[in-house]
Amino acid sequence: MATLRRYSRQRERIYQAVHASREHPSAQMVYDLLREELPRLSLGTVYRNLHQMAQEGMLQELEGPTARFDACLAPHAHIRCTCCGRVMDLSALEEPAPVRSAAEAGWQVERYSLMLEGICPACAGKDHNEF
Amino acid sequence: MATLRRYSRQRERIYQAVHASREHPSAQMVYDLLREELPRLSLGTVYRNLHQMAQEGMLQELEGPTARFDACLAPHAHIRCTCCGRVMDLSALEEPAPVRSAAEAGWQVERYSLMLEGICPACAGKDHNEF
DNA sequence: TCCTTAACAGTAATGATTACTTTTATTAAT
DNA sequence: ATTAATAAAAGTAATCATTACTGTTAAGGA
């Protein structure tokens, strides 16, 4: 009987790509990063593995128009630039109050995300997009 | 010269539908709610108006796989049931710390959302989905 | 009334994501 | 080593939410 193969080559590299990147990459970004090294990699494989790993708690998945992934599991917030799309980390040491109040109201809180939106210093610098 | 018609009949009813609902409706839900009353309403019109109103600050748009809208502008958090999809409010009186720290780092914070996920009391009761 | 134009309906197109079908490749037992 | 069993992959098709596009409608001012 075949045993679970937890770590296929592709899965391993997909995880490493997210872990190595500070960009909070999307599935497409991971795919693009790995195409050269793994020419036979398929986008579906990237999606499948990212979601599996998110479900297993190895990665966290960030909300937004397109999903982004983060290998850093320590609780922290994120901010996305509405101008260039960049996603950055913000430290968040203490748990927001609503997490506790949801639990007290009988919810089984599985995860939470604090996502900010705004204009990053770089984009604010070049005062407004010139396209 | 024609003046801005800020409040067309459709736009008016779309706003009211969101305002009247406690469901944090999606565009599709608003469309379904209004079809009977406005048989010629188009889904594109619903999307367009919801986004316009969100941009004008009349509504807030919630993150997630499909966008949900909320006419309550007071700062508060949301929790979505991973089982039934229901979205509920959570009060959040104080601003989370990362909002200030992003501003201090030079971001122009436009908005933020605290979104929780978990299993709602009702779903937890009927221990696990029977489909 | 006639002109201008915002907003509309209807539909086509896009983009992210998921599902499906076939192939590959790893493991375990023979 | 060969084979059988199966998890994971590739490749592709389908779905779903959303956006864009192309006329059409209709309200307000001249």
Image: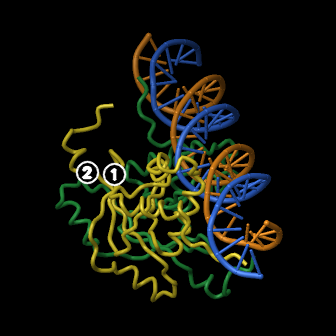
Chain colours: A green, B yellow, C orange, D blue
- Give x and y (percent) for residue B38: 52, 51
1 vs 2, front mark: 1
Report crowding for label 2: few under 14, some 14 to 19, many 20 or more residues within 10 A (C-alpha): many
Query: Considering the numbered disc 2 on the image, is that residue within a helix, a strand or a loop?
Result: loop
- Give x and y (percent) for residue A84: 63, 73
Foreground residue among B28 and C20: B28
- Give x and y (percent) for residue B64: 45, 57
Q: Residue at x 43, y 56 (%)?
A: A59
**Residues at circles 1 and 2 in contact by the CB criterion of under 8 Å:** yes
Say which amino acid is labelled 2. Answer: Cys
Q: Is residue A44 left or right of residue A71?
A: right
Q: Residue at x 49, y 59 (%)?
A: A69
Label 1 sits on residue: B86
Q: Residue at x 48, y 53 (%)?
A: B66
Q: Report how far apart the C-alphas of labels 1 and 2 lie in the structure.
A: 8 Å
- Looking at the rendered structure, whether the residues under marks 1 and 2 are on a common chain is answered as yes
Is B61 rendered above or below residue B2? above
Q: Is residue A73 left or right of residue B65?
A: left
Disc with the residue nearer the chain's start (1 vs 2)? 1
Query: Which image quadrant: the N terminus of chain A?
Result: top left
To which chain does the residue with label 1 belong? B
- Give x and y (percent) for residue A37: 67, 51
Q: Quadrant of residue A107?
A: bottom left
Q: Residue at x 20, y 60 (%)?
A: A103
Report crowding for label 1: few under 14, some 14 to 19, many 20 or more residues within 10 A (C-alpha): some
Query: Which image quadrant: the C terminus of chain A?
Result: bottom right
Say which amino acid is labelled 1. Answer: Arg
To which chain does the residue with label 2 belong? B
